[in-house]
């Protein structure tokens, strides 16, 4: 039986290259709580959502206007029994132009039904992709998680 990775697609009013450039602006659509860099091959960045979610990503494939792949190199998902459930998974953005629009196919390889995070994580990805990333590309303004003030 084939595993079913979480996948969602959106259509945006932009060229493939514009969509690609917007995806790489992670702080403009996912979270402003980012350390590191997220634009070039082999860049590494860490995102944080309070004390609930921390994950480190490495850009392992970039094809301008066509594809972006992040490898999750580390994670601490404090709401799960297996806090490192994302480790080794891949996050893909596949971009194609169709009928004067651009389709972005988002896939989180390894986020499959049956793992603990599937429900919460697929719901969160759905909101970030369908609402925040789409809004960023179509209107210039995304809805990322706002910057947190760090204590200590």
Image: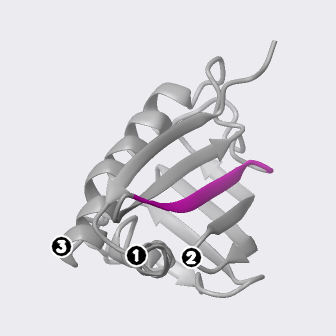
Q: In this view, does 102 lie to the left or right of 74?
A: left
Q: Where is residue 2 in the image (x, y as percent from the top left)?
A: 78, 19
Q: Residue reaching furthest front?
A: 99
Asked whether 55 falls inside the magenta stretch, the response is no
Q: Distance between the residues labelled 2 and 3?
A: 19 Å
Determine which residue is flagged by label 2: 65
SS type, badge 1: loop
Q: Are marks 1 and 2 in contact (CB under 8 Å)?
A: yes
Q: Where is residue 103 in the image (x, y as percent from the top left)?
A: 44, 56
Taking the spot 44% from the left edge, 45% from the top edge, the residue there is 9
Q: Position of residue 11 (x, y in %)?
A: 35, 53
Q: Quadrant of the N terminus?
A: top right
- The mark lying in front, picked from 1 and 3, is 1
First along the sequence among labels 1 and 3: 1
Disc ID at residue 139: 3
Q: How far apart are marks 1 and 3 (CA)?
A: 14 Å
SS type, badge 3: helix
Q: Main secondary structure of the magenta part?
A: strand
Q: Where is residue 91 in the image (x, y as percent from the top left)?
A: 64, 54
Taking the spot 39% from the left edge, 68% from the top edge, the residue there is 31
SS type, badge 2: loop
First along the sequence among labels 2 and 3: 2
**Extent of the magenta region:** 88-98
Asked whether 92 falls inside the magenta stretch, the response is yes
Q: How far apart are marks 1 and 2 (CA)?
A: 8 Å
Crowding around mark 1 (Cα neighbors within 10 Å: few <14, some 14 to 19, many 20+) is: some
């Amino acid at each position: 039986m084939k595993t079913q990775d979480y996948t969602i697609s959106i259509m945006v009013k932009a060229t493939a290259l514009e969509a690609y450039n917007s995806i790489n602006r992670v702080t403009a659509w996912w979270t402003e709580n980012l350390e590191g860099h997220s634009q070039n091959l082999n860049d590494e960045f860490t995102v944080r959502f309070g004390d609930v979610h921390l994950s480190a990503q490495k850009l392992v494939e970039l094809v301008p206007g066509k594809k972006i792949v992040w490898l999750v190199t580390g994670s601490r998902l404090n709401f799960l029994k297996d806090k490192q459930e994302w480790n080794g998974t891949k996050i893909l953005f596949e971009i194609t132009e169709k009928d004067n629009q651009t389709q972005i196919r988002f896939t989180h390889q390894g986020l499959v039904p049956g793992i603990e995070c599937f429900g919460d994580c697929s719901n969160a990805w759905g909101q970030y992709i369908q609402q925040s990333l789409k809004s960023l590309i179509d209107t210039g303004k995304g809805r990322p998680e706002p910057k947190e003030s760090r204590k200590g």
